[in-house]
Image (cartoon, helix red, strand yellow):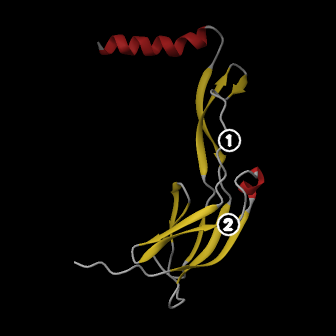
Amino acid sequence: MISMRLHCVAVIFALPLLSGCIAVPAPYTMKASGIFHGRVLDGQSMSPVAGATVEVTGYPKTARTTGRSGDFTVGPARKWYGYFVIGMHQHAIPEPEPPDIVTSITVRHPSFWQVTKDAGGTSKDRDSVKQRFELGDIQLQQSLPTKR
Protein backbone atom coordinates (compact mmCIF):
# COMPACT_ATOMS: atom_id res chain seq x y z
CA MET A 1 0.00 0.00 0.00
CA ILE A 2 2.80 2.43 0.92
CA SER A 3 4.83 1.54 -2.15
CA MET A 4 1.78 2.24 -4.36
CA ARG A 5 1.38 5.71 -2.78
CA LEU A 6 5.08 6.39 -3.16
CA HIS A 7 4.90 5.31 -6.81
CA CYS A 8 1.93 7.65 -7.45
CA VAL A 9 3.72 10.57 -5.79
CA ALA A 10 6.84 9.92 -7.87
CA VAL A 11 4.78 9.88 -11.07
CA ILE A 12 3.03 13.14 -10.15
CA PHE A 13 6.37 14.88 -9.66
CA ALA A 14 8.05 13.23 -12.66
CA LEU A 15 5.36 14.07 -15.26
CA PRO A 16 6.09 17.82 -15.38
CA LEU A 17 9.81 17.11 -15.74
CA LEU A 18 9.24 14.68 -18.62
CA SER A 19 7.09 17.20 -20.46
CA GLY A 20 9.72 19.93 -20.12
CA CYS A 21 7.66 21.79 -17.57
CA ILE A 22 9.11 22.36 -14.13
CA ALA A 23 6.77 23.21 -11.26
CA VAL A 24 8.54 24.26 -8.08
CA PRO A 25 6.53 25.53 -5.12
CA ALA A 26 8.03 28.47 -3.22
CA PRO A 27 6.30 30.58 -0.56
CA TYR A 28 6.25 34.36 -0.77
CA THR A 29 4.63 37.16 1.15
CA MET A 30 2.84 40.41 0.60
CA LYS A 31 2.94 43.11 3.25
CA ALA A 32 -0.36 43.81 4.98
CA SER A 33 0.79 46.64 7.24
CA GLY A 34 3.47 49.18 7.88
CA ILE A 35 5.68 49.30 10.98
CA PHE A 36 4.27 50.67 14.23
CA HIS A 37 6.31 52.24 17.03
CA GLY A 38 5.22 53.64 20.38
CA ARG A 39 5.25 53.26 24.15
CA VAL A 40 2.73 51.64 26.49
CA LEU A 41 1.96 53.53 29.71
CA ASP A 42 -0.21 52.99 32.78
CA GLY A 43 -2.96 55.59 32.26
CA GLN A 44 -3.16 56.36 35.99
CA SER A 45 0.50 56.60 37.07
CA MET A 46 1.90 57.38 33.59
CA SER A 47 4.69 54.84 34.21
CA PRO A 48 5.85 52.43 31.46
CA VAL A 49 4.08 49.06 31.31
CA ALA A 50 6.41 46.08 30.96
CA GLY A 51 5.03 42.77 29.68
CA ALA A 52 2.29 44.19 27.48
CA THR A 53 1.68 42.27 24.24
CA VAL A 54 1.46 44.48 21.15
CA GLU A 55 0.46 43.08 17.74
CA VAL A 56 -0.74 44.26 14.36
CA THR A 57 -4.50 43.77 14.64
CA GLY A 58 -5.46 40.39 13.18
CA TYR A 59 -1.86 39.13 12.84
CA PRO A 60 -0.87 37.37 16.09
CA LYS A 61 2.50 36.29 14.67
CA THR A 62 3.60 39.94 14.82
CA ALA A 63 3.17 40.03 18.63
CA ARG A 64 5.97 41.61 20.64
CA THR A 65 6.25 42.10 24.40
CA THR A 66 7.19 45.46 25.85
CA GLY A 67 10.27 45.72 28.06
CA ARG A 68 10.82 47.88 31.14
CA SER A 69 10.66 51.09 29.09
CA GLY A 70 7.25 50.14 27.60
CA ASP A 71 8.60 50.76 24.07
CA PHE A 72 7.53 48.59 21.15
CA THR A 73 8.07 48.19 17.42
CA VAL A 74 5.82 45.75 15.54
CA GLY A 75 5.19 44.90 11.93
CA PRO A 76 5.05 44.63 9.11
CA ALA A 77 2.33 42.00 9.00
CA ARG A 78 2.66 39.60 6.09
CA LYS A 79 0.25 37.33 4.28
CA TRP A 80 1.76 34.12 2.89
CA TYR A 81 1.03 32.73 -0.57
CA GLY A 82 2.21 29.72 -2.54
CA TYR A 83 4.28 30.58 -5.59
CA PHE A 84 5.05 28.21 -8.44
CA VAL A 85 7.78 28.43 -11.04
CA ILE A 86 6.50 26.79 -14.19
CA GLY A 87 8.95 26.31 -17.03
CA MET A 88 11.07 29.41 -17.41
CA HIS A 89 8.23 31.73 -16.33
CA GLN A 90 7.08 32.56 -12.83
CA HIS A 91 3.38 32.27 -12.12
CA ALA A 92 1.42 32.62 -8.92
CA ILE A 93 -1.22 29.93 -8.92
CA PRO A 94 -3.87 30.92 -8.05
CA GLU A 95 -3.33 34.64 -8.65
CA PRO A 96 -3.37 36.17 -5.15
CA GLU A 97 -5.60 38.98 -4.00
CA PRO A 98 -3.56 41.63 -2.19
CA PRO A 99 -4.31 41.46 1.54
CA ASP A 100 -6.39 44.12 3.22
CA ILE A 101 -4.11 46.79 4.63
CA VAL A 102 -4.10 46.94 8.45
CA THR A 103 -3.49 50.32 10.06
CA SER A 104 -4.08 49.48 13.72
CA ILE A 105 -2.45 47.64 16.61
CA THR A 106 -3.90 45.79 19.60
CA VAL A 107 -2.34 46.05 23.08
CA ARG A 108 -3.04 43.45 25.79
CA HIS A 109 -1.87 43.05 29.38
CA PRO A 110 -3.47 40.90 32.12
CA SER A 111 -3.86 43.88 34.50
CA PHE A 112 -5.32 46.32 31.97
CA TRP A 113 -8.19 46.60 29.50
CA GLN A 114 -7.34 45.69 25.90
CA VAL A 115 -6.79 48.69 23.63
CA THR A 116 -6.90 48.91 19.82
CA LYS A 117 -5.17 51.99 18.43
CA ASP A 118 -5.65 53.16 14.85
CA ALA A 119 -2.60 54.72 13.19
CA GLY A 120 -4.68 56.88 10.90
CA GLY A 121 -3.75 55.33 7.55
CA THR A 122 -6.35 54.06 5.12
CA SER A 123 -7.02 50.41 4.41
CA LYS A 124 -7.21 51.19 0.67
CA ASP A 125 -3.77 52.82 0.35
CA ARG A 126 -1.16 50.21 -0.70
CA ASP A 127 1.63 52.71 0.06
CA SER A 128 0.78 52.54 3.77
CA VAL A 129 2.69 49.22 3.95
CA LYS A 130 5.87 51.27 3.41
CA GLN A 131 5.15 53.68 6.24
CA ARG A 132 6.46 53.79 9.79
CA PHE A 133 3.65 54.88 12.10
CA GLU A 134 4.74 56.75 15.24
CA LEU A 135 1.90 56.18 17.71
CA GLY A 136 3.43 57.95 20.70
CA ASP A 137 2.20 57.00 24.17
CA ILE A 138 -0.65 54.50 24.48
CA GLN A 139 -2.32 54.70 27.87
CA LEU A 140 -3.87 51.57 29.36
CA GLN A 141 -6.61 51.64 31.97
CA GLN A 142 -6.49 49.20 34.88
CA SER A 143 -9.13 46.47 34.66
CA LEU A 144 -11.36 45.75 37.62
CA PRO A 145 -9.99 43.18 40.08
CA THR A 146 -11.66 39.80 39.86
CA LYS A 147 -13.41 38.35 42.90
CA ARG A 148 -12.42 34.87 43.99
Rendering coords of residue 37 (x, y %): 64, 70
Badge count: 2
Mark 2: few, some, or many residues within 10 Å (few <14, many ≥20)? some
Relative height, residue 72 to residue 27 (above, below):
below
Task: Name the amino acid type tagged 1.
Answer: Pro
Task: Name the amino acid type tagged 2.
Answer: Ala
CB within 8 Å, label 1 to label 2: no
Relative height, residue 34 to residue 78 (above, below):
below
Q: Residue furthest top?
A: 19
- Per the image, label 1 sits on a secondary structure element best described as loop
| Residue marked by disc 1 | 98
- Left or right? Give the position of 59 relative to 122: left
Badge number at residue 119: 2
Rendering coords of residue 85 (x, y %): 66, 26
- Left or right? Give the position of 31 relative to 42: right
Please identify the quadrant where the N terminus is shown. top left
